[in-house]
Image (cartoon, rainbow, N blue to C red):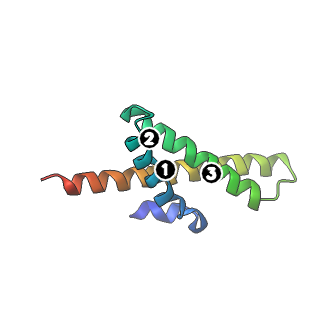
């Protein structure tokens, strides 16, 4: 799982949270299956935005852009890891 070295350690908690969110959305039937990864991705970016805003000091435009980039990339990576985990579970259950 080399991709985990790119995710900030503080944000690794989002991986199981986003995995659970995807499972909950699937069970609830609110979204078609093809939209669930996008919804999980959006939730990942939103949660990372909250974390970045809470932990970053943004005194310049450059720091604001860095915060936006960090939030977006970390959110996508966390969501990707959650979806990847879901696929591992699904493939393991197949015969």
Identify the element where label 2 is drawn: helix
The alpha-carbon separation of the residues under discs 1 and 2 comes to 8 Å
User: What residue do we see at 53% from left, 64% from top?
Assistant: 12
Q: Position of residue 31 (x, y in %)?
A: 43, 33
77 is higher (above) or lower (below) than 13: above
Residue drawn at (45%, 50%), measured in percent from left and top?
80
Are there few (<14), some (14-19), or many (20+) residues within 10 Å of tag 3? some
Disc 3 is placed on an element classified as: helix
For the point 39% across and 42% down, which residue is it? 26
Check residue 67 in the rendering and tell me which mark sits there, or answer none. Answer: none
* Left or right of residue 8, residue 49 in this image: right
Pick whichever of labels 1 and 2 is earlier in the sequence.
Answer: 2
Graded by Cα atoms within 10 Å as few (under 14), some (14 to 19) or many (20 or more), the crowding at tag 2 reads some
- Residue 54: give x, y in percent of width and height: 75, 58
Name the residue that disc number 3 marks: 47
Image side of residue 90 versus residue 59, left or right: left
User: Tags 1 and 2 in contact by the CB under 8 Å rule?
Assistant: yes
Viewer-side residue, 33 vs 72? 33
Q: Is residue 59 left or right of residue 4?
A: right
Could you tell whether 58 is left or right of 68 in the image? right
When the figure is inspected, residue 63 is found, relative to residue 9, above or below; the finding is above
For this orientation, the residue located farthest to the right is: 59
Question: Mark 1 sits on what residue?
Answer: 79
Q: Earlier in the sequence, mark 2 or mark 3?
A: 2
The residue sitting at 52% across, 61% down in the picture is 6
Mark 2 — residue?
A: 37
Residue 81 position, x and y percent, is 43, 55
Disc 3/disc 1 C-alpha distance (Å): 10 Å
């Amino acid at each position: 799982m080399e991709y985990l070295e790119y995710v900030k350690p503080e944000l690794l908690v989002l991986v199981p949270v986003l995995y659970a969110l995807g499972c909950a959305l699937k069970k609830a039937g609110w979204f078609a299956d093809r939209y669930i990864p996008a919804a999980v991705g959006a939730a990942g970016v939103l949660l990372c935005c909250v974390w970045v805003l809470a932990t970053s000091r943004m005194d310049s435009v450059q720091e604001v852009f860095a915060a936006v980039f960090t939030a977006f990339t970390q959110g996508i990576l966390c969501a990707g890891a959650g979806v990847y985990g879901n696929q591992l579970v699904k493939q393991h259950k197949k015969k």
